[in-house]
């Protein structure tokens, strides 16, 4: 504990705990009244200001404003992966996918600290920040997103990503890939290496291929898109492949795992890749989306399993491994829910409700989640996949039978146009719900 | 599928006064919190508390009977021009759809 520590974050109760004075425990109930009169109905620290974390912070405050909520997020501006493919296509600016934490601070009373969370001590209930400061928590929420498995593909590390961007976390990488696409001469080939499951945003690579094909069709008509894939099927595959043919002819080529699509080696400087059976491909612009795992703070907290992802209690999204740590978003094992921003937001609300109930000592409500993922084939051609999720009698997450699914095949152009318009409506709504930002 | 316990209570509770649930306060009942959690995913397209209007309409403050009949029409595939709401509405029981309708009807726009 440092002197720098916010006085708010040190309750008398925890000083007592810190003293390790078991004999003083009966006194805690007497201190409870003091704690509540100080406005501390419990302290929650949330790590990560994306769809899952920002939502959890807001909805804990909505559930009980007396709970002290601190959000730890390195960036003052958050760029969303959703709609970053439109930036790559030149259809949107970075400004239109940027969000901030002002509403969380000013309207909801969330304390926001811009720092990197470096380590967790689950026994002491503390989180150490890059600033040297240590925060005490009663409940910790981790929404750490993903990290990349550097060198899982030979030659693809952080340095290589400066030459052959992943652009799978929005921000400078998005702009780097955009500049490369702009600088590419007409007649070039954009190659994307797509990962095996599970990974962030299952339909994302195929929307990206679509949006880049759209850009090429407008500005570089002799250019091609080649997807080298580490799997044999992908999200909304039937809709994507028929739309590609319909809208882009043979501009987009997809090579499946079985057809030697899996990239095993990258030479970023030469923009070359080698696939499993030794085929060499040379790109004009090379985009490698590497294999992924939960963001590193999840490993530090000890909540990941051997797969690198985080198993959770589906009712509350509390870690299966470490008490009082809740994990939401892409980092979790929450199948059949996808790793999407929508799902992260929905999980943030379930965790928020569970945390409010646990701090108040009341019953946790039954969780429900939904998901809708829109993908754009072109700016006026949208497709979607939807799902409604609940717990079954064995407390496993299931998709409600008979619900959800993808947009119909063979729908009219007006249907696709409507879904493209709803994609924009969805983006505006989830941004407002998560950060309060309105564009 | 058997309805969950809180929802059953809620289904029989009839017209609850839910006006105070936005934002939820510490004194919210278990039933109100259950309804709020059931409804919380709706915000991802309709905005917090269903109040955001755009290409997707706001749903807050509309009569419960209208919302309920629309949700049931989506569920039964009787809504012209449905794109995704039919697929979503099929994920809820009729009772759950009624709870959602009452929840949003009781939020002031």
Image (cartoon, coloured by chain):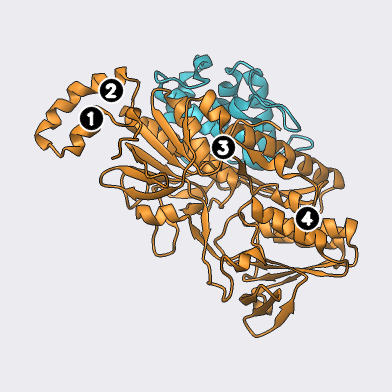
Chain colours: A orange, B cyan
Circles 3 and 1 on the same subunit:
no
Q: Is any atom of residue A388 visible in this view?
A: no
Mark 3–mark 1 contact, CB under 8 Å?
A: no
| Cα gap from disc 2 to disc 3, whole angstroms | 41 Å
**Residue A13 badge:** 1
In the rendered image, the quadrant that contains the N terminus of chain A is top left
**Residue A363 badge:** none
Label 4 is found on which chain of the structure? A
**Other residues around mark 3 within 10 Å, as few (<14) / some (14–19) / many (≥20):** many
Quadrant of residue A78 within the rendered picture: top right
Mark 1–mark 2 contact, CB under 8 Å?
A: yes
Q: Position of residue A306 (x, y in %)?
A: 39, 65
**Other residues around mark 2 within 10 Å, as few (<14) / some (14–19) / many (≥20):** some
Can you identify the residue that label 2 sits on? A35
Q: Is any atom of residue B40 visible in this view?
A: yes
Q: Position of residue A231 (x, y in %)?
A: 62, 70
Q: Position of residue A431 (x, y in %)?
A: 63, 36
Residue drawn 61% across the image and 30% down it: A436
**Other residues around mark 4 within 10 Å, as few (<14) / some (14–19) / many (≥20):** many
Q: Earlier in the sequence, mark 1 or mark 2?
A: 1
Q: Is residue A338 left or right of residue A44?
A: right
Residue lying at the far front of the rendered structure: A3
Determine the secondary structure under disc 4: helix
| Cα gap from disc 4 to disc 2, whole angstroms | 53 Å
Circles 1 and 2 on the same subunit:
yes
> Of A372 and A377, which appears nearest the observer?
A377
Determine the secondary structure under disc 1: helix
**Other residues around mark 1 within 10 Å, as few (<14) / some (14–19) / many (≥20):** some
Q: Is residue B64 above or below residue A191?
A: above
Label 2 is found on which chain of the structure? A
């Amino acid at each position: 504990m440092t002197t720098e520590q916010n006085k708010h974050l040190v309750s008398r109760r925890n000083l007592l705990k810190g003293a390790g004075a078991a004999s003083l425990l009966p006194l805690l109930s007497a201190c409870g009244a003091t704690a509540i009169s100080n406005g501390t109905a419990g302290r929650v620290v949330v790590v990560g200001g994306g769809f899952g974390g920002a939502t959890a912070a807001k909805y804990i405050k909505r559930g009980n404003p007396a709970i002290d909520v601190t959000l730890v997020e390195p960036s003052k501006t958050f760029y969303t992966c959703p709609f970053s493919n439109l930036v790559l296509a030149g259809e949107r600016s970075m400004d239109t996918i940027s969000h901030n934490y002002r509403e969380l601070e000013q309207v909801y009373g969330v304390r926001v600290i811009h720092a990197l969370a470096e380590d967790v001590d689950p026994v002491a209930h503390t989180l150490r920040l890059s600033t040297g400061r240590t925060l005490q928590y009663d409940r910790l929420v981790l929404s750490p997103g993903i990290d990349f498995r550097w060198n899982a593909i030979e030659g693809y590390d952080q340095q290589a990503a400066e030459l052959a961007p992943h652009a799978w976390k929005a921000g400078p990488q998005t702009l780097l890939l955009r500049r490369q696409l702009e600088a590419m001469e007409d007649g070039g080939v954009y190659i994307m290496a797509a990962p095996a499951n599970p990974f962030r945003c299952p339909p994302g690579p195929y929307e990206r291929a679509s949006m880049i094909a759209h850009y090429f069709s407008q500005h570089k008509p002799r250019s091609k898109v080649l997807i080298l894939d580490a799997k044999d099927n992908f999200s909304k595959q039937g809709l994507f492949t028929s739309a590609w043919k319909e809208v882009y002819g043979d501009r987009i080529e997809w090579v499946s795992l079985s057809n030697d699509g899996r990239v095993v080696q990258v030479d970023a400087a030469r923009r070359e890749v080698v696939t499993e059976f030794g085929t060499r491909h040379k790109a004009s612009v090379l985009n490698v989306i590497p294999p992924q795992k939960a963001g590193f703070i999840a490993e530090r907290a000890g909540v990941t399993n051997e797969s690198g992802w985080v198993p959770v209690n589906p009712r509350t999204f509390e870690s299966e491994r470490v008490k009082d740590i809740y994990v939401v978003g892409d980092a979790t094992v929450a199948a059949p829910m996808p790793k999407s921003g929508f799902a992260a937001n929905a999980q943030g609300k379930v965790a928020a409700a569970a945390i409010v109930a646990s701090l108040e000592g009341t019953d946790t409500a039954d969780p429900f989640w939904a998901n809708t993922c829109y993908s754009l084939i072109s700016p006026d051609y949208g497709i979607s996949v939807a799902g409604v999720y609940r717990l079954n009698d064995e407390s496993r997450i299931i998709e409600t039978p008979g619900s959800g699914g993808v947009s119909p095949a063979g729908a009219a152009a007006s249907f696709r146009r409507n879904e493209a318009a709803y994609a924009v409506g969805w983006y505006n709504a989830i941004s407002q719900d998560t950060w309060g930002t309105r564009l | 599928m058997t309805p969950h316990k809180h929802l059953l209570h809620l289904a029989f509770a009839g017209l609850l006064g839910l006006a105070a649930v936005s934002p939820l306060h510490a004194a919210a009942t278990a039933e109100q919190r259950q309804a709020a959690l059931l409804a919380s995913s709706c915000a991802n397209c309709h905005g917090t508390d269903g109040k955001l209007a755009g290409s997707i309409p706001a749903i807050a403050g509309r009569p419960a009977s209208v919302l309920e009949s629309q949700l049931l029409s989506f569920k039964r595939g009787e809504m012209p021009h449905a794109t995704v709401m039919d697929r979503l509405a099929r994920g809820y029981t009729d009772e759950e759809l009624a709870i959602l309708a009452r929840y949003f009807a009781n939020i002031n726009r």
